[in-house]
Amino acid sequence: MYPVLRREFIEERGWITEEELTDYYAVGQCTPGVVAINVSTFIGDKRGGAAGGFAATFGFVTAPLFIIALLAASLRAFAEYPVVRDAFAGVRVCVCVLVVNAVARLWRNSVTDGATFFIFALVFALCAVSPLLPFSVSPAAVVAASALFGAAWRRCKRGGR
């Protein structure tokens, strides 16, 4: 979703900056619901207060809800056709490419120095070994800990001010 959100909100409309989108996307991943809806709600709130946030959420959800309901109702009838299975296989490949593209963009905007690289490496390692651990690692806890570390690091770099 990141490339789609970037194109719509930054490139086409100019409503937010790249840094704001990165922040909204990170918070949107930690809050319940679909990331794109959460980001839209944040942008609506920024542009029009609570009413703007509500309008953005309602506008974002309404049309897709009807389309998904129609597709879900008709998909069962066509799911067994080889052409439909092959189409979904192609979609999976496309989704992988979009995810790699989003990670590359987030990397360029987020990993800017040694401290942010350290946070990245630590979080990556934690997420990579998480399935092997006897306890689950909450994504919200990882983001919160990363935010605290980043804030502390920035404060230390400024001399404790």
Image (cartoon, rainbow, N blue to C red):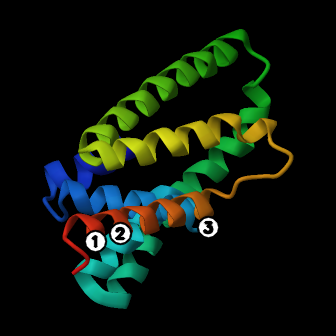
Q: Can you name the residue that lies furthest to the front here?
A: 159
Residue indicated by mark 2: 151
Task: Give the labeled residue for mark 1.
Answer: 155
Position in image of residue 64 (x %, y %): 52, 55
Image spot of residue 61 (x, y percent): 50, 64
Q: Amino acid at mark 2?
A: Ala
Disc 2 is placed on an element classified as helix
Residue 38 shown left or right of residue 157 in the figure: right
Q: Secondary structure at mark 1?
A: helix
Distance Cα–Cα, label 3 vs label 1: 30 Å
* Circles 1, 2 touching at the beta carbon (< 8 Å): yes
| Label 1: few (<14), some (14–19) or many (≥20) C-alpha neighbours in 10 Å | few
Q: Earlier in the sequence, mark 3 or mark 1?
A: 3
Q: Residue at x 25, y 46 (%)?
A: 109
The answer to whether residue 4 of the structure is visible from this angle is no
Q: Are marks 2 and 3 in contact (CB under 8 Å)?
A: no
Taking depth in this image into account, of 76 and 27 the one nearest to the observer is 27
**Residue at image coords 62%, 43%:** 126
| Foreground disc of the pair 2, 3 | 2
| Residue type indicated by callout 3 | Pro
Location of residue 126 with respect to 35 vertically, above or below? above
Q: Amino acid at mark 1?
A: Arg
Q: What's the residue at 33%, 63% (across, down)? A: 153
Number of residues whose C-alpha sits closer than 10 Å to that of mark 2, classed few (under 14), some (14–19) or many (20 or more): few
Q: Is residue 79 visible?
A: yes
- Above-or-below relation of 64 to 76: below
The percent coordinates of residue 44 (x first, y second) are 32, 75
In the displayed structure, does residue 45 sit left or right of residue 47? Answer: right
Q: Which residue is mark 3?
A: 32
